[in-house]
Amino acid sequence: MPLVVVDQLIKSYGATQAVRGISFAIEAGRCTALLGPNGAGKTTTLNMLSGLLKPTSGEIRFDGVAKGEDLRAYIGYLPQYTNYYNWMSGREFLIYVGRLTGMDKRSAVRRADELLELVGIEEAKNRRIGGYSGGMKQRLGLAQAMMHRPRLLILDEPVSALDPIGRREVLELMKRIKQETTILFSTHVLPDAEEVCDDVLIIRRGEIVIAGSLDDIRKSNQRPVIELELEDAAALADLLPALRELAGTASLEQAGSVVRFMMKDADELQRVRPKLMDRLAARQAPLRRLEIAKTSLEDLFMEAVQR
Amino acid sequence: MKQWLVLFHKELVESWRNYKWIWIPLAFVMLGIMQPVSTYFLPEILEMAGGLPEGAVIQLPTPTGGQVMMETLGNFHTLGLLILVLAFMGSIAAERVSGVAGMVLVKKVSYSSYVTAKWASAVLLTVVASVIGMMGAWYYTEELIGPVSGAAIASGCLLMCLWLMFLVTVTIVCSAVMRSSGAIAFVTILIAAALTLISSMSGTKLHWSPGKLADYAGAAFAQGGMPEGIGGAVICTMICIALLLIAAVTLFRRKELVG
């Protein structure tokens, strides 16, 4: 039974549709990445889930929650651009958030201290938030989203604005958090998604183009690739017409002295490989590297969003 | 209710930490004592300013305590109002623009509590500042000018507070609806000016209008007690405040907090 089911969600602004009929489900206990280029509708989708935006049409159903009930109690949300009351300390803000969500003072204090430790900013807990660094604010953002133990944690671009170190820290933190809470987060950076998520939703111009578990997507979309590198670009240019002819239906990509053949399937690989070897040997091509690899998720992502 | 108290407490702490609880009452005290003190020293001030021919005799009619208090009231209604509008114009708008409102309201926080807690904190500060300012004015008027009856002070103070409360409510409504603080201040002051102008030009026809409260507060000092026939205006103002708050919550709820 999925935790959240989203059905035909549409958000339009005037004549333009930012989100055009998205449907997906989020399984409890999994970490899902909403992946897509800038402007694909990721933030709009997350804002509708969080209740900050009202969908133009469509439905969001939460497991065990009656229709029409306020979903905000079950959701923890970290917006893309965080802002706090800069005059509060980190600890004060967490306690304030906890008390707003109905905790009594003592349990709010306890939970705040627990989370400050979890996200690793306890040494700064009594400093004013105005003096926090971007990474610290992001970690405080994670803590405030988790104060009321939500069933779904929604994170909008949690690492995009951070430097490499901050990014690493927050990703590690997300790995730890996902042990306890279902997470849905958006990103436009594929390696970030690959690192922490179990499921992927790839979204393009307001529509979902690929959805499924990371492993399944990898398996079902993986195709063999032949990567060939010669000593120099001139030698490759020489060889290129012959290679094109040989490639047949496989798509061919060239960059500098490297050429990549993307195969449709393993059969095609079996057909092309021996011919290619013959050709290379016959021409005595100045080979530097010949590699049989598989398409990466990056290739799939680029293909999906550029189609 | 518990949530409302948490929100209200946060507002109080915030206005304490950004010194609103210091500078607003201080500004009102200054406004309050300015009038009696400058009236008392007016002959000396004129003399020192110079430019008068040798042997000129300045004869000023000595004003009564009530008259000085009425002039003080005028200061509260103009400069005092300006201070309040500047202090509270951002109370909702600034939080919306910075995004922290979204951060709070994405939790299960009721929109009406959010708005009314801000309103209550602003009103409390307004009333305290007005009363302290009034007390300052009263003290110096009694010391330097002449007696003013306690009944006049009480009635004048009450009516002035109600009028300022009404305008602070307008500020909060504008703050819930608009994003630009300049526009919020402009609209609020325009409404205040329009209401007083229309009410005083219409004579007694609009005796129930909130805009009349400023006149009535002045009349309290002229007559030395609560003036007659103010019930309509008082009740009407209270109803207006309630309706404005409902409007603020309704409009704010319909606003989308992002994008």
Image (cartoon, coloured by chain):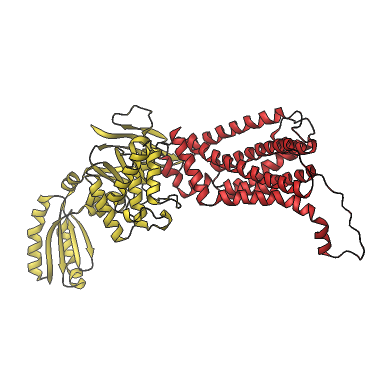
Chain colours: A yellow, B red
Q: Is residue B249 left or right of residue A44?
A: right
Let me know if residue B116 appears in the view. yes
Q: Quadrant of residue B232?
A: top right
Let me know if residue A204 appears in the view. no
Q: Position of residue A43 (x, y in %)?
A: 37, 46
Q: How many marks?
A: 0
Q: Is residue A130 left or right of residue A242?
A: right
Q: Quadrant of residue B131?
A: top right
Q: Residue at x 63, y 37 (%)?
A: B166
Location of the C terminus of chain B by quadrant is top left
Residue reaching furthest to the front: B143
Q: Residue at x 68, y 49 (%)?
A: B79
Q: Is residue B75 left or right of residue A219?
A: right
Q: Residue at x 57, y 51 (%)?
A: B22
Q: Quadrant of residue A12?
A: top left
Residue reaching furthest to the right: B55
Q: Position of residue B104 (x, y in %)?
A: 42, 42
Residue in the foreground of this view, choosing between A170 and B7: B7
Q: Position of residue B3 (x, y in %)?
A: 44, 35
Residue in the foreground of this view, choosing between A132 and A219: A132
Q: Position of residue A263 (x, y in %)?
A: 16, 53
Is B155 placed above or below B44 here? Answer: above
Residue in the foreground of this view, choosing between A210 and A170: A170
Residue in the foreground of this view, choosing between B174 and A25: B174
Is A286 placed above or below B149 here? Answer: below
Is A210 placed above or below A291 here? Answer: above
